[in-house]
Image (tube, helix red, strand yellow):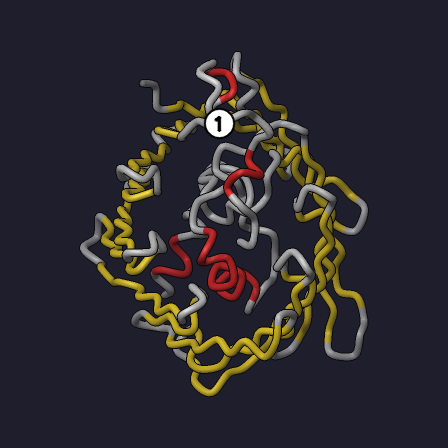
Amino acid sequence: MRILSILFLSLLLVNCSNDDDNSNNNNNDPIDPDPIVLPKLVAYEVGPNGTNVQYEYNDNELLEVWTETLPGFGFEITTAYNDELNPNVWYYIDSEGVSDQKGFFYDLQGRVFRYLDAQDDVTLIYDNDNVVLFEGMIDEVTDVSGSMNLNSQGKVIRFNALNQYLTFDYDASGNMTGLNQFDNNDELIHAYTFSYDTKNNPFYGQYLALYLVRTIDLFWDFTQVNFTGFSGYVYPYSPNNLTVIAKDGVTTTSYLIGYDNDDYPAAVSEVSSGNSYQYDIIYITE
């Protein structure tokens, strides 16, 4: 069983189911004292049936503690940062006493060149500005390798894995709008599309240095979209909020979002596979 890679899939109950500069999260004047223009930090996500997540941040407003509770289970992730304020170690422990830690190592340009935990030991090789190779152990399988092609904004546009490859499309804001899954004979397996609102995604801007790491973790053995919805820090690399997911042209999941007075998501109704869920997003207030 994966620990630190799976944990960021977030054990989603409510969802059956990089890179960018922090300033892209809003177009506001940072010295404007009006609280409407200030970025907000998520304190809680509260879902149905006792499902909730609590987030705590350090003095630099970087995510430090992530505590998730589901019926009969829970886990906590604590993040340590290096002097350059990049994640250095994730410490994981769950309610069943399982613990692990994931370490990240950076080169002189602040890029992750290696990460490892109990089941992964991956080296990233930056071939040039547009190609990143990776090799090592993934999911306890040794001697694996793959590569990622990047666009000029540093977003992954092609992910080459063992038995398939994925291509990605983005809008002008950097939101992932398309994910196409191909086999190695260039036959399309599935095509996913994603739609967004025009409001700020409150989860955007954390773990930017780990964008490529998270991409490897989530897409190496990709079978379905499982990085959206509840637990917004699973893959926090889209500036806006997701509203619709479609698979092969058919809507599979939709989100109806209610916003607070600052135009941040406050209440989210998700409809997925014929089931409806609601969760609330609560922010830290000064």
Q: How many marks?
A: 1
Q: Secondary structure at mark 1?
A: loop
Apparent side of residue 207 relative to residue 37 in the rendered image (left or right): left
**Dot 1 corresponds to which residue?**
30
Q: Which quadrant of the figure has residue 199?
A: top right
Residue lying at 26% horizontally and 62% vertically, measured from the top left: 101
Position of the N terminus by quadrant? bottom left
In this view, 22 is above or below 264: below
Location of residue 69 in the rendering, given as x and y in whole percent from the top left corner: 31, 38
Apparent side of residue 31 relative to residue 270 in the rendered image (left or right): left
Amino acid residing under circle 1: Pro
Residue lying at 35% horizontally and 66% vertically, measured from the top left: 104
Residue lying at 51% horizontally and 25% vertically, measured from the top left: 278
Location of residue 250 in the rendering, given as x and y in whole percent from the top left corner: 78, 43
In this view, 127 is above or below 96: below
At label 1, counting other C-alpha atoms closer than 10 Å, the crowd grade (few under 14, some 14-19, many 20 or more) is: few
Residue ranking furthest to the left: 97
Front residue (pair 152, 221):
152
Q: Which quadrant of the figure has residue 49?
A: top left
Position of the C terminus by quadrant? top left
Location of residue 53 in the rendering, given as x and y in whole percent from the top left corner: 35, 35
Residue lying at 27% horizontally and 37% vertically, measured from the top left: 59
Location of residue 7 in the rendering, given as x and y in whole percent from the top left corner: 38, 54
Residue ranking furthest to the front: 31
Q: Which quadrant of the figure has residue 25?
A: top right
